Image: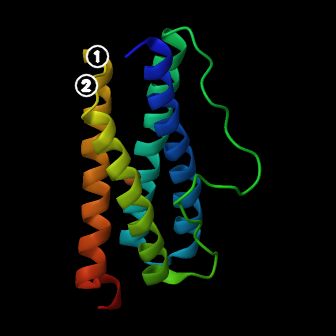
Amino acid sequence: MNPGEVVEVLAALARLDMDAVVAYEQAIAAVDVVAIRDRFAQFRYDHERHVDELTTTIRNLGFEPPSPKSGNEMEPGLLPVTPSAGAEAALDVMHTNERLISRRYTEASRMKLPLPILTLVAKNCRDEQRHFQYVEQTLAIRTWGR
Ligand SMILES: [Fe+2]
């Protein structure tokens, strides 16, 4: 993989992470269950950190990282959270989003990336699997209704 191809992979992940930050901001505003909001805030922070790390890595390779999008357009397959969603609808949307992001990170972690970059991608991939599992389990056991 040449540096340009590596950067394409990283930029695609960074764009997903940027949209995840936006989606989590929307989800935090839409949910009134403190325990879920706190988790969402942690996950938003993870995604912000991913953006920072990916952006730095892209710059270190001599390329310009993707800039944050203006407007509400999201990457294909990612969904926004509507302000009036409530816990279940917000979790449903984040379930879809985290499944996609988790898949993309898993695909990237199987690519022939340079080792330090692969290490970063694998670390982020574990974060995404953790996010997805939390959303899936919370939806399954419906903790907010008790
Ligand atoms: Fe995530």
Reading the image, the residue beneath label 1 is 116
Which residue occupies 62% across, 55% down? Answer: 74
Figure check: 142 above or below 68 = below
In-image side of 128 versus 37 (left or right): left
Q: Is mark 2 within 8 Å of ligand 1?
A: no
The image shows residue 63 at horizontal and vertical percentages of 58, 14
Secondary structure under tag 2 reads helix
Reading the image, the residue beneath label 2 is 119
Which residue occupies 45% across, 56% down? Answer: 41
Q: Is there CB contact under 8 Å for labels 1 and 2?
A: yes
**Quarter of the rendering occupied by the C terminus:** bottom left
The local crowd at label 2, few if under 14, some if 14 to 19, many if 20 or more residues have their Cα within 10 Å, is few
Figure check: 104 above or below 33 = above
Secondary structure under tag 1 reads helix
The amino acid beneath tag 1 is: Pro
Figure check: 115 above or below 122 = above
Q: Quadrant of residue 83?
A: bottom right
Q: Quadrant of residue 140?
A: bottom left
The image shows residue 31 at horizontal and vertical percentages of 50, 76
